[in-house]
Amino acid sequence: MEERVQKILSQWGIASRRQAEEMIKLGRVRCNGAVVELGQKANPIQDTIEVDGQLLRSPHRPQPTYLLLNKPTGVVTTCDDPQGRPTVMQLLPTNLRQGQGIHPVGRLDAESTGALLLTNDGSLTFALTHPRHDISKTYQVVVAGHPPESVLKQWRQGVVLEGRKTRSAQVRVLSRDANRTWLEFILWEGRNRQIRHMTEKLGYPTLQLHRTAISSIQLEPTVGAALPPGRYRPLEEREIHYLQNQLQNQLKSTTRVQV
């Protein structure tokens, strides 16, 4: 069965869908000896597909892997970094870091910490990072000063960033001290540095940001020890099933829109 080449690469764990598209644009992918064009289709059973000169074979397709990492501060959420900064991939052992197609799902900026999914399931990555997904993400945020209820209400209702209003969010105060306020934010979208831009725009810049959960997948489970910074764990079966259900829901939603 023919599929778009970028989808084949994501399904085989070579890269996320967006990363695969960039690889194709750079001419790094060949099908039957010819450079692949974006949108081109192929049959992975019949056609010969190469990435950077390396032949892809179905028996070598890695096993699907799903990990939860507690990202520490100062680490960038990329597979490699031209500036030489430490990456989240370097927190994994060599057997997971090389040849498995594992990559981070979405981003946390370098100074932010907390829950980050990593997988070699490209279709899942595409679904979870699609702008229309409805998976919640929970953050503990420390801001400067003491935002009043009127400011909290604006954050909940949405703030205009770069000409577009953010989606509704849940925001509540956890605690305060003389100069800072601890907040919980729950978002259903993931724009670049969104919380930092939202808080700074209303005059209460973010001092610390820590993601505690991706939907029901939590760093601190109700049973068992919390995941220390820099450490990872495989997802439990129930967590994998939850994410796969989200993927199916995303596919159904996309199909309805196309129809």
Image (spheres, rainbow, N blue to C red):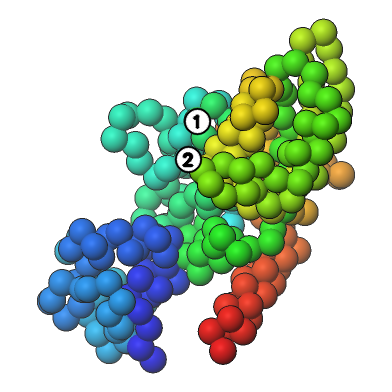
Q: Amino acid at mark 2?
A: Thr
Q: Residue furthest top?
A: 178
Q: Residue furthest left?
A: 33
Tag of residue 110: 1
- Local SS, label 2: loop
Against 250, residue 197 (above or below) is: above
Q: Position of residue 204 (x, y in %)?
A: 69, 22
Q: Position of residue 53 (x, y in %)?
A: 17, 64
Relative horizontal placement of residue 169, taking residue 203 as reference (left or right)? right
Q: Which residue is mark 2?
A: 77
Please rate how many residues cluster around mark 1, counting C-alpha atoms within 10 Å: few if below 14, some from 14 to 19, many from 20: some
Residue at left offset 69%, top offset 61%: 134
Residue in front for this viewpoint, 86 or 171: 171
Residue in front for this viewpoint, 201 or 247: 201
Residue in front for this viewpoint, 194 or 214: 194
Please rate how many residues cluster around mark 2, counting C-alpha atoms within 10 Å: few if below 14, some from 14 to 19, many from 20: many
